[in-house]
Image (cartoon, helix red, strand yellow):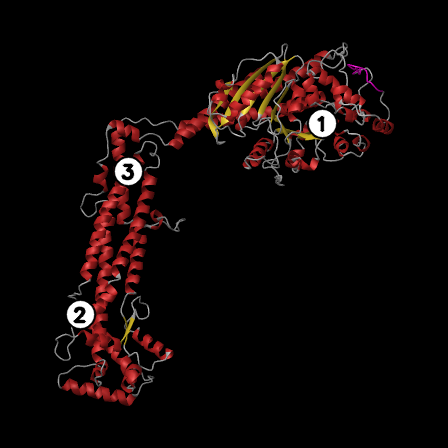
Amino acid sequence: MASASTPQTPVEGTKDRESPFDIIPTPKSDFEEPQADQYPRTYSNPPTRPVTPSAPRVQEIAEEPIREESQRAPPAPSPTRTRSFFGSRGPRSAPATGEEPKMGDYFTKRRELLNILKSLHSTGIQNELDLPQIVVVGSQSVGKSSLIESMSGLTLPRDTGTCTRCPMECRLQYGQVWSCKISLRFHVDRTGHPLATIRDVPFGSTLYNAQDVERMLRRAQRAILRPELDPTLFTDDSDLHVFGVPLTFSGNCVCIQVEGPNIPDLYFYDLPGIIANVGDGGNEADIRLVEDLAKSYIKKPNCIVLLVISCETDFENQGAGRLVLKDPALRKRTIGVLTKVDRVLTKVDRIEFGGSSKWLRMLRGEDQPLMHGWYCVKQRDLGQLQEGVTWEEARSYETEFFQTTAPWADLDYSQRSRLGSGKLAERLGTILSNLAQQELPGIRKTVNTELTKVNNRLKELTPPKIADPRRVVITLLRDFTKQLSKHIEGIPPMVNPSDPTDTTATGLLHSLNEAYERFRVKLHKTAPQFRPWTTTANVDSQKQKQMLDSAKQDDDAVGLGTTCSLHADEIMDLARRSRTRELPGNYPFSVKERLILESVCQWSDLAQECFTEVKDIVVKHIIRVVEEHFKGYNNGGLKEAVSKITSEQIVKCAKTTSKKIGSLYQSECSPYTQNEQYFLGYKTKMLTRYKVIHQELEGRTNLVTALRAYNASNTNSTGNATQWNYLTNAISNLTYFGITVKAEDFITLLPQHDVTTALDIMAEVRAYFQVAYKRFGDNVPKQIDADFVRGIDGSDDSDGLDVALMSMDLSTEKCMEYLQEPASVIRERTALSGKKQRLEAAQLKLERYYRG
């Protein structure tokens, strides 16, 4: 499986702030050779071979057979050592007179600083504040657990592949008697979301035998990976009999507190190793999960990163190195540790592992430089663990290894000061305590400020005291119906609404009117499409366009319709075929009725489509009003109850409206009108227009052209003045006989032709459509508005929503339930209460520290 590459972008939050570690001083002993009488060099066992200069020594080692570490006899403890290599009490040798109080005060002060850090972390306040902390980061199987063992004296769980599957908080502290306490800290749920209240659960009793720690840590980690079970089940392995699927990794912590006479004062987190791939059946998401967990720790400006790199694997293949060292800001607060330095010394490597080795260049700061440099450590290998080599013996082996093995023994003092777990632990303790001393005043101020903010917010979230819950609920319901009535009657819209689809801002009636207008346009497109010429007429496309343009002067639906076009000869043919026993020259009314229904049959779907659109607009509008009015009353079911009854009212009104729209359509299926004046007037206009177009096709264009082009009131008119004079005289002469006519009326005097009846039918059908479509286009929106829009709140004097809402259960007990606080408010108050407890605990510990 291919390894997952680490993203090459800086970790968030690491460049926004100048590193506080820039001003942390480096202990003088790390860089200067001590005076001869200051720290006398003592050995637990004399070196087995003398130390010689670098080049001869490398050659000598290259020629010697390789001795395995496990083959060396453990050195006897030194009786002259006044203090363990890892002891934090006093100097390494007897101090000069007058220096003891000074060194004692230093270690006491450092221990106090580390103790206050431990206390603050125990409150869980690190989720709100950036507390100084050390985080151990490394790739899978680089020896992180062995490094922690070498600093703490613990035996940690070991497995092939990934062993650490949750963060481990390690608190190391000097004590007269060795002891170990284990606890579990739950601050996220199974899905990784933060808990409102952090739980610290003691796990088992205090341990006084270091050999018991490994077993209990395995159990503790199982408890973290199965947070749904009682932690006490894991202390005796009872959990192994409970079916369930554990998490692969978790953000919750196993907390270890170790005290002992040889334990350094130190506090750090050990994170799961960065993984590049997963095995068969593994979850690819775990790669990202572990990396994100590491990022969540190291992105904090006050986090000291302890980067563990194995010399057994190429540096470029270790994802943790890429994760940390790609960011210059992280380099300023990172300490590098090289592990497994003894395992690279194969027979070939003894020659190559010289001054040009990458690992030595890193130690000297020539490659991958860090602000606090690199350290080298040597831990117990698997063979030594199986042989039962003790922690103290391993410390002696490590000291002897670096003092007698090239190239380490040949380094100058400033570099030798970075060899060994003890020097690393001492340096970490110094950096952490210095950082704590620098940051504590700001932390104290932040705690006080945050606590004030939390208290003020909790006051705002204090639950209201309700004397008469029934009255409150009834008032809410009445205010809601009044507000809805205003929206239905029409309220002014907002200027430049941010959301054009929000009808509460754009105006409900405006949106409804737009829907009605779209319905009218679609209805108009169903107009009959008549062509007042025959299908056999010699009409080219240009001529047809001219005639259609002429027809549009009196019929704006020409060319827009969804109805099939019919020519004059087709209408005439239909009329002839429809005759039964009528007298010659008469045609049945069913011809006109059939042509009318060709358009009307499309109206039912259009009307229902209009109603559906209006209903959707109204429903969405009412939902918005309900959400806004009852947004604080969802937890007790009030909003749900109102929504249910409102929905029932909408469904009832919708059924009534749909039936009435159906009745309107059925009435239009039988042609009928009393609008005689409009009907006859439109018929005359259309008939004249049809005849004009037909006469043009017949070649009788002189009179038509004169009537169209000449205007007696305009001297620039292009018409024929002579023809116009003839028409004027004819009109005057007819007036003498009491007959009043207009110039256009002379078109009716043109000779009859075989499609005259068809033109009359076409004009009458088109005139009736104009009457009927306007009537239906008004009646449908009117019916929807009366029975549905106004019917919802009872604006039409029927039982509306206000009456329906009074059918709810309005007993005092139910109203108290309705008025329960929103879940969001309860969650916020719970979270703030937990935060307040943590802040108060941190504040108390800080005040005690500053009071001494």
Q: Earlier in the sequence, mark 3 or mark 1?
A: 1
Of discs 3 and 2, which sits in the foreground?
2
As shown in the figure, which amino acid type bears the numbered disc 1?
Answer: Lys
Q: Nearer the viewer, residue 174 or 310?
A: 310
Q: In this figure, which residue is indicated by the disc labeled 1?
A: 340
* Residue sitting at x 62%, y 14%: 210
Q: Secondary structure at mark 2?
A: helix
Secondary structure mostly seen in magenta is: loop
What is the span of residues highlighted in magenta in the rendered image?
Answer: 39-49
Secondary structure found at label 1: loop
Residue 626 visible (yes or no)? yes
Residue at mark 3 to residue at mark 2: CA–CA distance: 54 Å
- Give the CA separation, mark 3 to mark 1: 70 Å
Query: Which label is found at residue 642?
Result: 3
The amino acid marked with disc number 2 is Ser
Q: Is residue 397 left or right of residue 242?
A: right
The amino acid marked with disc number 3 is: Val
- In the image, is residue 360 part of the stretch drawn in magenta? no
Tell me residue 101's x, y (percent): 70, 12
Nearer the observer, 801 or 63 = 63
Q: Does residue 462 sit above or below 718 in this rendering? A: above
In what quadrant of the picture does the C terminus appear? top right
Indicate which disc, 3 or 2, sits on the residue closer to the N terminus: 2
The residue pinned by badge 2 equals 590
x and y, in percent, of residue 160 in the image? 62, 28
Taking the spot 26% from the left edge, 76% from the top edge, the residue there is 570
Residue neighbourhood size for the residue with mark 3, other residues' Cα within 10 Å, grouped as few (<14), some (14–19), many (≥20): some
